[in-house]
Amino acid sequence: MGRVVVDVMPKPEILDPQGKAVAGALPRLGLDQFVSVRQGKRFELEVEGDVTPEVLAAAREAAERVLSNPIIEDVVNVVDAAAEVSQA
Amino acid sequence: MGRVVVDVMPKPEILDPQGKAVAGALPRLGLDQFVSVRQGKRFELEVEGDVTPEVLAAAREAAERVLSNPIIEDVVNVVDAAAEVSQA
């Protein structure tokens, strides 16, 4: 099974109340390194076989037509999950 | 300014109605390659200077204590945005 990761973030000029709320909570936990927090969406799309260029193109189309609202959001990543840098 | 990306996904065993709704909509647009869709959250945490190991550790603590609900969600990525593979 292949997996494509699609990341969608609010456009920079768009107000992000959720991000602001989180940014406000962090210092109360002693985590005062962060000057701002923005919250977006992460999707994982699974396919039967491998993530081919055609699959990535279909994921990009899905990202632009269904997974994001182009007026207030940007699609910032459409990537094969296997290629993703992960340090959880 | 440095940026840390934190990705949070619902635990695999948790029902994901939003992901199911999206998965159901894609074939109607001719996008029938995807067997499932899961929706999670992506955060971008900004810091004044560089993303140091200490900053990453603080971001991981924020991820576990504020940005995710450990009962239903997993923190899947805590990574310097500069190191992220991006192909939007």
Image (cartoon, coloured by chain):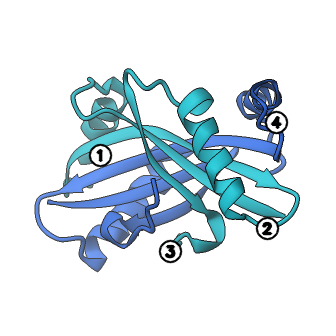
Chain colours: A blue, B cyan
Distance from disc 2 to disc 4, alpha carbons, whole Å, reads 25 Å
Q: Are marks 2 and 1 on the same chain?
A: yes
Q: Which quadrant of the figure has residue A48? A: bottom left
Helix, strand or loop at label 1? It is helix
Q: Residue at x 72, y 49 (%)?
A: B45
- Please report contact status of discs 2 and 4: CB closer than 8 Å, yes or no: no
- For label 3, count other residues whose C-alpha is less than 10 Å away and answer few (under 14), some (14-19) or many (20+): few
Judge depth for marks 4 and 1 and give the one in front.
4
Residue under label 3, please give it: B87
Numbered mark located on residue B50 in the image = 2
Please report, as a chain letter, where disc 4 is located: A
Q: Position of residue B73 (x, y in %)?
A: 40, 30
x and y percentages locating residue B59 in the rendered image:
65, 46
The amino acid marked with disc number 4 is Leu
Residue at mark 3: chain: B
Dot 4 and dot 1 within a common chain:
no
Query: In whole angstroms, how far apart are the C-alphas of marks 2 and 1?
Result: 40 Å
Camera-near label (2 vs 1) is 2
For the residue pair B44 and B53, the one nearer the viewer reads as: B53
Kindly indicate the quadrant of the structure image that contains residue A23: top right
Residue for badge 4: A15
Chain for mark 1? B
Label count reads 4
Q: Residue at the spot x=56%, y=60% of the render?
A: B79
Position of residue A62 relative to residue B88, above or below, is: above
Q: Is residue A69 visible?
A: no
Name the residue tied to disc 1.
B26
Chain bearing tag 2 is B
